[in-house]
Amino acid sequence: VLGVSERAELTAAPERLWELPSWLLNRAARHATAEVAAAFEAAGASRQQFTVLTALTEGPASQATLGRRLGIDRSDIAAIVGELERGALIERRRDEDDRRRNVVTLTPAGRDALARLDRAVEAAQEQLLAPLAPHEREELARLLIRLLTAGERATR
Amino acid sequence: VLGVSERAELTAAPERLWELPSWLLNRAARHATAEVAAAFEAAGASRQQFTVLTALTEGPASQATLGRRLGIDRSDIAAIVGELERGALIERRRDEDDRRRNVVTLTPAGRDALARLDRAVEAAQEQLLAPLAPHEREELARLLIRLLTAGERATR
DNA sequence: CAGATCTCAGCTATACTGAAATGC
DNA sequence: CGCATTTCAGTATAGCTGAGATCT
């Protein structure tokens, strides 16, 4: 989150970069992360913990499934689930149908924590999108979704 | 850059995340970075080196100015300029008008390297934007620029 | 003196790799 | 056997902080 003076300097970035979608996306993502950061910090959770908790609202899942759904690496999921377990926000137990797997389940405490996180994250979205009119917000979301759903399929 | 199977799994991300602009922006930026990565790797340069070289096409600048213009930290700029100097893509000399400063200048070799990088990066943009029609690409750029120029000014 | 610039050491988060242990 | 899952150790990059040296 930058102040006015830094903003003035940033606008002085080379023309070429302002024409590069990949640069714009990275900039915007950094801005978005900065906006949301305060929400997570205040709640004592990380961005990754939030996404894992969110995924678990749709039901228990193995760590591998969580990783694939969220696009988070298997080894990182192991660490994140470990943190959440220490905070008693999730429960991790061996899947008896397939003993390679851990079944990860949201606890009531986890559900409460997520509810608080959700409100804070929602407020941050409002901050982030403040410069855009409602129809522009929808349009931005639509374009990003198309970039992701069509783009990541097409490549490789 | 994901394959078809991973894509199918990713679409299975929780509904809630697909509605979160900050999540979409992070995802899209990651996708964009992946697309551009090959371009930089093939040319043996980093994303940051590219942006610094690009900034220098608008003329010599001190490291502090580069940092402010590009939104890169002073300490990171020092390291990046050091790398570029070792590759003889830039020249770094003390500013005799203000001896605290280093004046960083693009060398002919640097200009050549940037020309090659630029072509590769441009091809990557094409890949990245493939799912979008021309007017959609413009609209996406417009919305991102508004988010950045209005958004980063408003906050704090 | 205050303040700017450059540099270095070190920190955190994110993303990823390789290998081992276990189980299907 | 091949393959999937979990876990750990380690790597790389981006972004950032603190402190010191130098200079205006």
Image: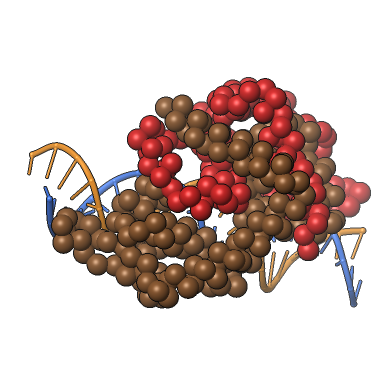
Chain colours: A red, B brown, C orange, D blue
- Of residues B37 and A81, the one nearer the viewer is B37
Q: Quadrant of the C terminus of chain B?
A: top left
The picture places residue A123, in percent across and down from the top left corner, at 59, 23
- Which of B132 and D18 lies nearest the eye of the viewer? B132
Is residue A128 at all visible to an observer of this figure?
yes
Q: Can you see residue A33? A: no
User: The N terminus of chain B appears in which quarter of the rendering?
Assistant: bottom right
Of residues C19 and B141, the one drawn nearer to the viewer in this rendering = B141
The spot of residue A10 in percent (x, y) is: 42, 43
Examine the rendered structure and indicate whether residue B77 appears above or below residue B109. above
For residue B107, side relative to residue D5 (left or right): left
Above or below: residue D18 compared with residue B146: below
> Residue A104, position in %: x, y?
77, 41
Residue at horizontal 51%, vertical 31%?
Answer: B151
* Picture quadrant of residue A125: top right
Q: Could you say where residue A12 lies in the image, as x and y percent from the top left?
A: 40, 45
Give the left or right position of residue B135, taking residue B110 as reference.
right
Question: Which residue is at 84% across, 56% downward?
Answer: B4
Residue drawn at (39%, 60%), measured in percent from left and top?
B56
**x 38%, y 32%: residue:** A4
Side (left or right) of C6 relative to A51: left
The relative height of residue A66 versus residue B101 in the rendered view (above or below) is: above
